[in-house]
Amino acid sequence: MVTLAVVGAGSRGTAYARHAVDSGLARVVAVADPVASRRDRFPSAAPYGDWRELAALPRQADAVIIATQDRDHVEPAVRFAELGYDILLEKPMAVSEDDCRAIVAAAERSEAIFAVCHVLRYTPYTRALKALLDAGRIGEIVSVQHLEPVGWWHQAHSYVRGNWRRADESTFMLLAKSCHDLDWLVHLMGRQVRRVSSFGGLKHFRPENRPAGATARCLDCPAEPGCPYSARRIYLPLAGQDRWPLSVLTDDVSEQGVLEALRTGPYGRCVYDCDNDVVDHQVVNMEFEGGATASFTMTGFTPAAHRQTRIFGTRGSIEGDGELLTVHDFVTGRAETVDTRATGDGTAAGGHGGGDEGLVRAFLAAVSSRDRTPILSSPGESLHSHLIAWAAERSRLDGETVTLEGTPT
């Protein structure tokens, strides 16, 4: 039985810990979070108001789940590596290149089992797709089109009203949200990215797009009934359910508790009257070692759905929607459909299509066996996907193609 400490018991830390406990392979023995109600989610665990209190003690668990806010990853990650803990670290690793490199160096010095939460690598869908590619079913990959449909309400929840709305308080959109996808593309290609260009911006969620007569909060806004981003419509139907995204708004998930949160908290604000500055759409073009290319689109103006991908090879192509894979064979002219559907959708509430559970089980297996094989990304690979994000953001801001140096894997 693996013993776990949870550092940051918000939405993601709690989700990973619950998957671990539900597997029967682990138990939570310590939890560190400044919010008492979050510590109370693990009543049998020793509670700490600050991770430093836990880190001041001799090692209390086999492994630690670090799921603090993005800007608060580097200190606990480095310290717990020094203390000999195995580490499951929420993405992004950190919000600066230097901090990411510091975390990788600490993990390598400690020889800990170390995994970044690149959950898309661990879904049944990805495993089936990777197997098809590795078996040569479509020959050599030449190009890829990949779409991340963030979802209109998810964009408003997390990146307009929520914790990731400002780059100076968290980080830029591509690193906060889409390092998943950049990592996933590298995983499929099996090669590093060499050159990147990118375009995008904050187009819609701006004061000048505010409907006539709109007020600062949805609950008293005459324009609310016709607004796609109505907080009343997004959150009130979830009242009574202790789950994401409602659990981010308030600990009191009753209808009255939700209404109070919308009256006074950030999630009841008009999306055209927030202090957000991260992009709501972005495209990234990538050239890989060997010359293959990929185009990636992140947009908030979609239903919240699985990623959608088209992969073009020398002997065939594959179209995927997160559940079904359609393989077109250029030799036979035939098409085959592979059904990979798992329980849950592609959002955090749905466990990222089985990715959350797959990641946690792989991490626990590695910790138990001291064999890193179940972990599908090395520290160096995780660093590379983050460096792609920084290169793309530099390209978006400066208007130039950016060349990446090779990253150790």
Image (spheres, helix red, strand yellow):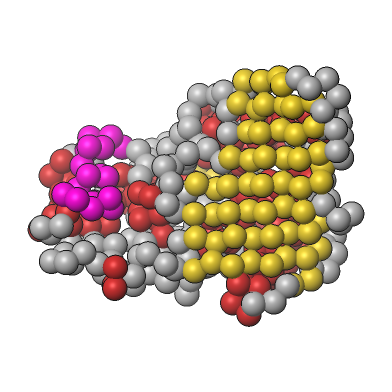
Residue 222: x and y in percent read 10, 58
Residue drawn 85% across and 38% down?
A: 314
Please identify the quadrant where the C terminus is shown.
Answer: bottom right
Left/right of residue 21 with respect to residue 255 in the rendered view: right
Looking at the image, which is closer to me, 395 or 234? 395
Residue drawn 78% across and 59% down?
A: 287
Q: Residue 240 falls in which quadrant of the image? A: top left
Looking at the image, which is closer to me, 390 or 52? 390
Q: How many marks?
A: 0
Q: Is residue 328 above or below residue 185?
A: above
Residue 330: x and y in percent read 82, 28
Residue 231 belongs to magenta span: yes
Residue drawn 82% across and 42% down?
A: 141
Please identify the quadrant where the N terminus is shown.
Answer: top right
Residue 310 visible within the image: yes
Residue drawn 24% across and 62% down?
A: 270
Residue 56 visible within the image: no
- The residue positioned farthest toward the right in the image shown: 290
Looking at the image, which is closer to me, 252 or 232? 232
- The residue positioned farthest toward the bottom in the image shown: 398
- Which range of residues does the magenta coloring cover? 225-242
Residue 161: x and y in percent read 33, 61
Residue 128 belongs to magenta span: no
Looking at the image, which is closer to me, 50 or 277? 277
Residue 115: x and y in percent read 68, 47
